[in-house]
Image: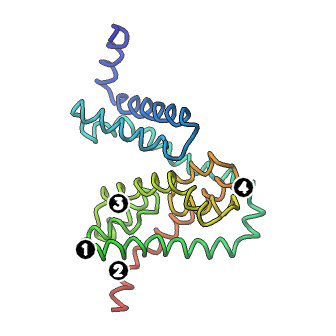
Amino acid sequence: MSDPLFALWVYLAATPLAGLALTLVAYAAGWSAYARARFHPLANPVPIAVALIVAALAATGTDYRTYFDGAQFVHFLLGPAVVGLAVPLAREWPRVRRLARPIAGALAAGSLAAAASVVALAWVLGATPRTIASIAPKSVTAPIAMGIAEQLGGLPALAAVFAVTTGVLGAVVGKYVLDAVRVRDRAARGFALGLAAHGIGTARAFQVHAEAGAFAGLAFGLHGLVAALVFPFVPSLLRWLM
């Protein structure tokens, strides 16, 4: 390593900027691999960046809290990024109003299927109640999923892992699933990706087409809102029914 690069590394390692620099470099490497693969879904940059960051933290013996202290600026930008989804959605607003009823039906059916299917599978496989509570909100964006899991008695950290894994898998295999069931409409494909794979699926939808991205952002936001309002009442409802 040359002297200027070594001096830069020493400076970064001694400040919280190390986490930010590592995040940006890892994602840039993931995006480069994604572009070289001609944006193939299997080369999604998110899992590549995550793998590089984990490898770097393990190799240097850096704990997650130290890393996050530097990377929290990227975390802060998630808020403005989500708000920014309203811009493409505004362009599609006339169509959204015309499709209000189908959208409401798809949101209800998709939200119920996303939670019920994974809870039933986890229960059949003998998962503990705490694990089931952690995996139930897996199709909701990670920050909301962590809060829901905590209220249900689950583990927020485990909920975040399930949510991110779901987003990555949805972005990777979503195209093939939608092709297999012959869903061709861009709005329907985008809505399905945003509902099932939250933010990561929404990013993938935008890469395909702006219309798909707008409806993915709509599903992403509505699903998070509905889940945050409904999930906390599920335990009480189950106890009442039983």
- Label number found at residue 126: 1
Q: Is residue 155 above or below residue 234?
A: above
Q: Do callouts 4 and 1 mark residues in contact (Cβ within 8 Å)?
A: no
Mark 3 or 1 closer to N-term? 1
Instruction: Name the one closer to the observer, 91 or 192.
Output: 192
For the residues carrying marks 3 and 2, which lies nearer the camera in this image?
Answer: 3
Residue position marked by numbered label 2 in the rendering: 235
**Residue at point 61%, 57% (across, down):** 216
Report which residue position mark 4 lands on. Answer: 90
For image coordinates 68% across by 49% down, the residue present is 209
Dots 4, 2 in contact, CB < 8 A: no
CA separation in Å, label 3 and label 2: 17 Å
| Type of amino acid at the residue the image marks with label 4 | Ala
Answer left or right for 175 relative to 140. right
Residue 29 screen position, x and y as percent? 46, 31
Q: Earlier in the sequence, mark 4 or mark 2?
A: 4
- Nearer the viewer's eye, disc 3 or disc 4? 3
The extreme left residue here reads 61
Element type at marker 3? helix
